[in-house]
Image (spheres, rainbow, N blue to C red):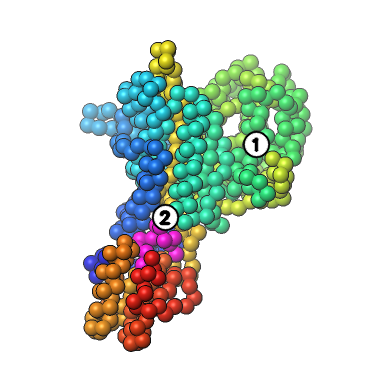
């Protein structure tokens, strides 16, 4: 590529709405251009990075046995109604009508469509397992689009979906995808960590998130340097409670040590004996548009008839409001999530609303004391509060690791990938069945696997930058190498050497751009340092007279003289 024929448009200053370094640098480097809130044009430089990210993902997905297809962005509402997500998803799902008044959704993911493909195409156990993926534009009407590509409304995701006969098969597919993700993120050249995640509202059995490690990350990750324990804060916090879901035979108080949860703290403040009185207890947090927490909501389901009026409400700092909520009211507020309210009919729910401001946000923590009375997969409807990773900080550095092998450390990360074991949540709802050897129908066991393609760009920069600009890892750099001739238009010697080297590097498969724009050295270097091209070769008359060129890696403090004849070998 010749810079004179490529579109380069760098800025000295970032626009004022860019808050974090990756957003600022991408804007300054001319990689993206804002069209509207959370909506960007990917400019030629940015698109080159996206294409490289996609290329690596595609290769590794294909190697792992997944098949690429391409599903539509605009999807009929009927499919979304079949799984209930049409109602469940709230305003994050962008809905539109066609000229006939029919409803459609812009896909935030594609579970419904792929399940529809498979239920109509696949009949027999002989055709399984299957794994389909696409790399496609997603739309999520995020409550707070921000940070450039990090949390866009329109963005690109790779999403894959596996279909198996049984749970063992699904787990195998899941492991295959997990391993492919490890290879993908290694190939990107990024420091990352896979952490256990809470399945949350999606339900199912197992889930991991892949995080790019960056001090500016939104999520807190808990890990044990002495073992392979790693979880996001939400899962780490919820661990005692999660362990209790389903089985739920032990009293909450016992399983929750040593990390006492907030639920317990409030129960303690209220003077309620969790084991004796409370059937289950849940905490949700409401936030305002700036992400500040405005309310904590505690929901306690009590055993028997308890006069909660007697409870010393004043003991809870900042507790503003305390009242009994009717079942209908609770159904209204929480009931959009199936499975949530099932068995509480006989018990009296109590809703406590507090306006206590805690330093960190939580989405949802729940637990139970009794079988069949637990809250599983419960969450706010998405129109009530944007789900965020719980960051209760009840798990702190130095706590004992749950596996007993060491102590916990905490670092920050950016969620760039997420793998889920879905089980039959979608296949059962949509009647996606296969016939087994005996001709008996059974729902397929599914998994889903996402990577935030465009978010990778932001995450990579948050991890790799300096005061001059971006420092791309080689594998996803817009160009691997830039040739900077000093006086391309003035010196025949420089021009001839530059053209020779350019041709040889191209022939050797190096992704090289030559800056033939005739800029002064300072401006030329500043551009490429900002853009983040990881390798640079300067071709100047003075060096050439001694037969040398100057090589400098983007992180190197100084240039290295390399004989012109050896340069291609040096680069390769
Ligand atoms: P987040 O917690 O950041 O809202 P999510 O858990 O809602 O993400 P998933 O449904 O797990 O996202 O989607 C898979 C991947 O898609 C995420 O791991 C992330 O990399 C990417 N992604 C999700 N939302 C966005 C967004 N608004 N902009 C860019 N990438 C996104
Ligand atoms: Mg989200
Ligand atoms: Mg998430
Ligand atoms: Mg996720």
Report x, y in % for residue 397: 69, 51
**Dot 1, how many residues are within 10 Å of its Cα: few (below 14), some (14-19), or many (20+)?**
some
Does 411 sit above or below residue 335? below
Callout 2: CB less than 8 Å from ligand 1? no
Q: Residue at x 46, y 39 (%)?
A: 177
On whether residue 480 falls in the magenta region, the answer is yes
Identify the element where label 2 is drawn: helix
Q: Residue at x 32, y 22 (%)?
A: 120
Report x, y in % for residue 4: 24, 70
Q: Quadrant of residue 48?
A: bottom left
List the residue tagged with mark 2.
457
Q: Residue at x 31, y 81 (%)?
A: 486
Q: Residue at x 44, y 64 (%)?
A: 471
Q: Which mark is residue 479?
A: none
Q: Nearer the viewer, residue 347 or 534?
A: 534
Q: Quadrant of residue 262?
A: top right
List the residue tagged with mark 1.
239
Q: Quadrant of residue 83?
A: top left
| 229 relative position to 508: left or right | right
Does 283 sit above or below residue 559? above
**Dot 2, how many residues are within 10 Å of its Cα: few (below 14), some (14-19), or many (20+)?**
many
Give the mark, 1 or 2, whose residue is nearer the N terminus: 1
On whether residue 240 falls in the magenta region, the answer is no
Report x, y in % for residue 423: 49, 27
Which region of the structure is painted magenta? 471-481
The residues tagged by marks 1 and 2 sit, at their Cα atoms, a distance apart of: 32 Å
Identify the element where label 1 is drawn: helix
Majority secondary structure in the magenta region: loop
Q: Is residue 33 visible?
A: no
């Amino acid at each position: 590529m010749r810079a004179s024929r490529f579109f380069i448009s760098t800025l000295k200053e970032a626009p004022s709405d860019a808050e974090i370094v990756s957003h600022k640098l991408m804007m300054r480097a001319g990689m993206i251009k804002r069209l509207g809130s959370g909506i960007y044009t990917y400019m030629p430089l940015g698109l080159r990075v996206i294409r490289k990210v996609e290329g690596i993902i595609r290769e590794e997905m294909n190697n792992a046995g997944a098949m690429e297809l391409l599903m539509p962005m605009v999807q009929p509402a009927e499919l979304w109604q079949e799984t209930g997500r049409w109602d469940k998803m709230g305003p994050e799902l962008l809905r539109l009508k066609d000229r006939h008044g029919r409803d459609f959704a812009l896909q935030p993911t594609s579970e419904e469509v792929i399940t529809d493909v498979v239920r109509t195409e696949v009949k027999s156990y002989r055709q399984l397992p299957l794994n389909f993926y696409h790399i496609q534009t997603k739309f999520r009407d995020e409550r707070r689009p921000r940070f450039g590509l990090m949390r866009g409304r329109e963005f690109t995701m790779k999403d894959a979906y596996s279909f198996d006969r049984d749970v063992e098969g699904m787990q195998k597919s899941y492991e295959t995808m997990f391993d492919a993700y490890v290879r993908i993120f290694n190939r990107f050249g990024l420091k990352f960590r896979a952490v256990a995640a809470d399945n949350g509202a999606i339900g199912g059995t197992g889930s991991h998130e892949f995080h790019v490690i960056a001090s500016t990350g939104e999520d807190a990750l808990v890990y044990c340097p002495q073992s392979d324990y790693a979880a996001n804060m939400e899962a780490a916090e919820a661990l005692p409670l999660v362990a209790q879901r389903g089985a739920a035979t032990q009293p909450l108080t016992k399983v929750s040590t040593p990390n006492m949860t907030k639920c317990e703290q409030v129960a303690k403040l209220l003077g309620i004996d969790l084991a004796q009185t409370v059937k289950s207890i849940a905490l949700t947090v409401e936030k305002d548009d700036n992400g500040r927490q405005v309310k904590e909501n505690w929901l306690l389901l009590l055993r028997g008839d308890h006069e909660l009026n007697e409870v010393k409400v004043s003991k809870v700092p900042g507790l503003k409001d305390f009242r009994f909520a009717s079942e209908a009211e609770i159904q209204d507020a929480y009931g959009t999530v199936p499975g949530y309210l099932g068995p509480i009919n006989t018990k009296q729910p109590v809703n406590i609303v507090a306006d206590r401001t805690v330093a960190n946000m939580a989405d949802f923590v729940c637990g139970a004391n009794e079988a069949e009375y637990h809250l599983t997969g419960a969450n706010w409807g998405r129109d009530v509060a944007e789900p965020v990773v719980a960051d209760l900080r009840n798990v702190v550095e130095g706590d004992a690791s749950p596996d007993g092998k060491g102590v916990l450390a905490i670092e920050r990360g950016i969620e760039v990938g997420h793998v889920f074991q879905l089980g039959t949540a979608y296949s059962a709802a949509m009647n996606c069945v296969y016939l087994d050897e005996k001709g008996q129908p059974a729902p397929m066991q599914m998994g889903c696997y996402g990577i935030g393609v465009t978010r990778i760009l932001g995450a990579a920069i948050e991890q790799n930058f300096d005061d001059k600009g971006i420092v791309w890892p080689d594998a996803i750099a817009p160009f691997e190498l830039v040739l900077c001739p000093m006086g391309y238009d003035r010196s025949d010697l420089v021009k001839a050497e530059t053209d020779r080297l350019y041709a040889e590097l191209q022939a050797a498969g190096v992704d090289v751009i030559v800056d033939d724009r005739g800029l002064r050295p300072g401006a030329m270097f500043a551009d490429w340092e900002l853009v983040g091209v990881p390798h640079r070769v300067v071709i100047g008359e003075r060096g050439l007279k001694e037969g040398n060129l100057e090589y400098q890696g983007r992180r190197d403090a100084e240039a290295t003289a390399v004989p012109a004849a050896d340069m291609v070998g040096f680069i390769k």
